[in-house]
Image (cartoon, helix red, strand yellow):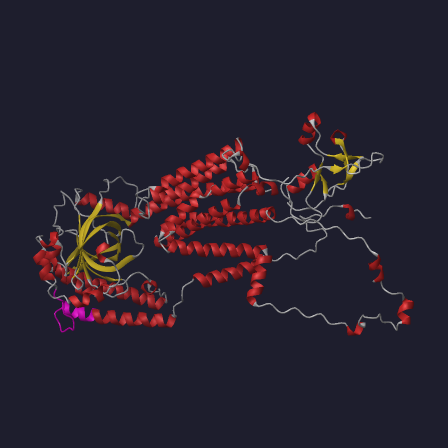
Amino acid sequence: MSTNDNQPPDLENGTGDAPQQQQRSSLPSFLFVTFVLFMLTSGRGDDVTQTRDQYLNGLQSLNYQLSNYSAWLNGTQSNFTLPVEDPNTLPLAEAFMTFGSEIHPAHGSYYSNLTGFWHGEVQPHNLTSLNASEAASSWRHLAEQFMLPTNLTAIPYLLGSWNWTNTNKLSLSAGDKLIAFENDNVEHKNVAIVHGRIDLSEPDGSDEMRLDFEGIHILSTGSVYALAESAGRSMDLRSLPALVPEEFRNESARAVEVELTTRISKLKERIESGSFEQDAADDDDSPKTKCTFRFFAQLEPTNVPKDLMDELEKEIDEPTGITTVKAPEMVIEGVLLSQSCGILYEIHHTVGVQSQRLNRKITTYSGISTLVNLLLLALFRRQAAQSSSAIGLSRVSHYTFLIQSLIDAISFIGHITLGILAEGRPSLSVLAPAGLACLLFVYEAQMAVLIGQIQAPEDAPSQQPSPTPAPTQASNANAPATPAADAATGGNTAGQPAPGAAAQPALPARPSFLQFLWTHIRTDPAARLWTILSLSLIVVFRIVIALSLPLFFIGSLYSCMWLMQIYRSARRTRTSGLSMEYLVGTTLGRLFFACYFLGCPKNILDVEPRRWIYAVALFMFVQVLVLFLQEHVDPAFFLPKQMSRAQTYDYHPPLPLPDPEAPEQTLGDCAICMDAILVDPSLRRRSKSSDGKERPVIGRASGILGKVGAARKTYSLAPCHHLFHTACLERWLAIKNICPQCRRPLPPL
């Protein structure tokens, strides 16, 4: 017998009795699953030719509007006429707010740049049906005069499906651009064009009513006069001067002309460069309305002198590090009203943060979150190295790492979304924590799959080897006939077909594409891994987008992160093997993101604080404490005794001893090292068999010998009846949890 025949099969290198399989490359699987992921998540593409035609039509329309508008401003013949605003509009708005006036530069000032994000509350009023308190108010007659031209029968059609009376919150994103121009050799810098979006939301709803607005900002008074329409509906900038007071109308009209000229130039550049953008309104599934709104807003004045305010805003826009006055709070009051639908919203104390300050907050958050993700990655890599053996992997729960991978997937998608919303330099800084979250997701998902593969044989039914039947007389009768007998029978045995008449084996049916794909995913670990990762990303992406379940889903993931590990340790009566450094560090790192967005009232996304996040944090630390007690007290210390022990396989059953007169007292050869397993004389006892004779067996002795025997057994008998040295089997199970001889799954030793 050669030396190779005496060696145990090496499962790590693929040698042994089992046929070797060619390792499949994961690249085709990755490319295919990536294609499927792209097809499932990507939106429809735009027809470039059709988009270019739309841009050209828009350019032609703007040129026509500008030519007529410029002719009207110059007093020449024109097809444009400034619309006449209802005289009751401004008085009705002034019943709910006070428009500002000019302030002496030494006594105070207004913010000159409204670019930023605003959040506040609104109070609705139904002008078509006033309640008792509204009917007794001083503005009732103004509302009645304001609603005289309205067609009441068309209001339900114009309103749409949105619940207007239940709306109580407002979010506003605005862009403010100063329009500087000269007229009659006089430079004008008192008018800015403001545009943006208004989002109205319900207290318990996830949908938002989105309105786009275009308006005029008078810098000297801090007042805003704007038009608002449902997202996707066009607005005519030329009608904006009709909203402002008479003393600012000419200046506002010239600013609108400059703005139209600027937009036409930008549109020409975009058409020439071919940089077309898809209209976001086409994919917007938010509620729609046909109501036309007027939006009036007034900035609260500050006590900062005008020169210091200019210095502050310049430092915010272009930081140089100089010391300036403390930035006062930026607050507006306003009114949003619709004559065509009879709706009026009071806008109360809406606080804003300028885009530059928000961008700095995003950059600071990105740096801190990057450090936290680096800490999580370092802790995971260290713990993965400690639990890299088969024994270490069998002690941890794969659900723990699967839950963490889902949390990191949500973190990755959230940071990518934040990077898209934060245009400019802050978007680049957010890519760092997003990339680390994606890396953590992949590593933890791979760890969960690996743990699942190691622990899969635990619950599999053990198949007992069937004994080989002894040859019988009947089997000899089926032996091949001798050549002489073949010659006597003409070379053919009775009852057997001739060799030429043997039936050809049927070719297997060619599987369909779906059957091939399913078989490929089941048999190829790489394909299975990438499929799980892709499906997990799709599910998490859909959950994060559908804003009805994310908070409940995230809270559930955080609450269950360590529960499955506690359950496994108690069920298997074995400690987790997770270090306290990993448990505490990972818990703190995970809670940083949850407590920042759900506990901090001034987070970068302006998410309202949820008090239940502190209960979730406390529950997570209780879980860490339970894992610590399982490690140092007992894995099932909190369970009753009758429930605290799991039934495990006994690797040391009583075995019959060899013949006492044999030259070597061995139980056999170890299936791993092939050396003899010597019998320990201290473990021998004598028992009587059914025939009354004494028969030597090896088993558990009583008294002192029983204690010695229970402490250490030199042999181990696997469920598949293969015999090993206990030390050899321990070393083997640290690498693989299958039998090295027959490759059947083995329970923990």
477 lies above or below 315: below
Instruction: Locate residue 233 relative to residue 418 in the image: left or right.
Output: left
Q: Is residue 740 left or right of residue 267?
A: right
Say which quadrant the C terminus sits in.
Answer: top right
- Residue displayed at 50% across by 35% down: 639
Quadrant of the rendered image containing residue 493: bottom right
Q: Is residue 668 above or below residue 707?
A: below
Nearer to us in this view, 537 or 433: 537
Query: Magenta span covers which residues?
Result: 66-84
The location of residue 85, given as percent across then percent down, is 12, 63
| Residue 184 appears in the figure | no
Q: Nearer the viewer, residue 536 or 585?
A: 536
Above or below: residue 576 compared with residue 470: above
Task: Tell me how many marks there are.
Answer: 0
* Quadrant hosting residue 699: top right
Where is residue 268 drawn, in percent x and y? 30, 67
**Does the magenta segment cover residue 433?**
no
Residue drawn at x 67%, y 42% as measured from the top left: 732
Q: Examine the structure image and report whether residue 70 is included in the region drawn in magenta.
A: yes
Return the x and y of residue 373 as percentages of the image width and height: 45, 44
Left-right relation of 117 to 569: left
